[in-house]
């Protein structure tokens, strides 16, 4: 690739190869030629696409592979959450839900329930119907908000209630995600 880019007329070369690749592709698509010729054209098109991709696409290995290896997964988790990851082990808690006013996008647990789950404000939480046979059909992912003092109660918004399809009186199971 550096051989093409080092030439004075590198853009002309790249665009000419692009036109050649398009013409050969059209010939293959329309079936112009014998099977052997079409096979050779296909190989040439594949080669030209690889060369032209390297020419036209700037590749930054750090930027474009970040998060795809075990060494950088922590950065991706932090980017997904939008903050530091809470890796403390907690337990699952069973709660009853209460509808709250407002659309703030967070759920509110008691201080004691948050301690059991080893959760902090801003952590991610998964809340589902306690009945395991539902397989998570009645569930939501949300964010912990300010804690309150009523143990065994989670305050959820109207939107979370609709998304989770929770039924009045059914117990929910909550666990910290990160």
Image (cartoon, grey):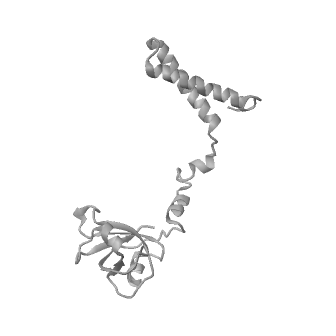
Q: Quadrant of residue 12?
A: top right
Q: Is residue 158 left or right of residue 36?
A: left
Q: Is residue 151 above or below residue 11?
A: below
Identify the residue at horizontal 56%, vertical 59% (top origin): 75
Furthest residue in direction top, as rendered: 34
Query: Whole-percent x and y of residue 164?
Result: 31, 68
Residue 42 percent across, percent down from the top left: 50, 22
Placement of 147 over or under 54, stated as above or below: below
Residue ID at (42%, 80%): 115
Can you say whether 10 is above or below 175 in the image? above
Say how many tags the image has.
Answer: 0
- Name the residue nearer the viewer: 114 or 11: 11
Tell me, yes or no, if residue 30 can be seen here.
yes
The residue lying furthest to the bottom in this view is 149
Name the quadrant of the N terminus. top right
Kindly tell me whether residue 92 is visible in this rendering: no
Q: Which of the 4 quarters of the picture holds residue 151?
A: bottom left
Q: Is residue 97 left or right of residue 43?
A: left
- Nearest the eye: 91 or 18: 18
The percent coordinates of residue 102 (x first, y second) are 40, 79
Measured from the top left, where is residue 105 in percent x and y?
A: 42, 73
Q: Is 84 in front, or is 144?
A: 144
């Amino acid at each position: 690739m550096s051989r093409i880019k080092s030439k004075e007329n590198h853009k002309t070369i790249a665009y000419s190869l692009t036109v050649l690749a398009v013409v050969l592709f059209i010939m293959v698509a329309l079936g112009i030629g014998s099977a052997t010729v079409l096979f050779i054209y296909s190989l040439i098109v594949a080669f030209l696409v690889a060369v032209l991709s390297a020419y036209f696409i700037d590749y930054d290995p750090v930027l474009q592979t970040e998060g795809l290896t075990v060494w950088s997964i922590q950065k991706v988790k932090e980017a997904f959450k939008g903050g530091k990851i809470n890796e403390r082990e907690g337990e699952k808690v069973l709660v009853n839900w209460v509808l709250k006013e407002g659309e703030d996008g967070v759920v509110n647990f008691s201080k004691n329930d948050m301690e059991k789950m080893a959760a902090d404000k801003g952590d991610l939480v998964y809340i589902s119907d306690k009945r395991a046979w539902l397989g998570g059909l009645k569930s939501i992912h949300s964010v912990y908000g300010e804690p309150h003092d009523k143990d065994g109660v989670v305050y959820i918004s109207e939107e979370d209630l609709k998304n989770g399809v929770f039924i009045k009186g059914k117990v929910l199971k909550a666990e910290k995600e990160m």
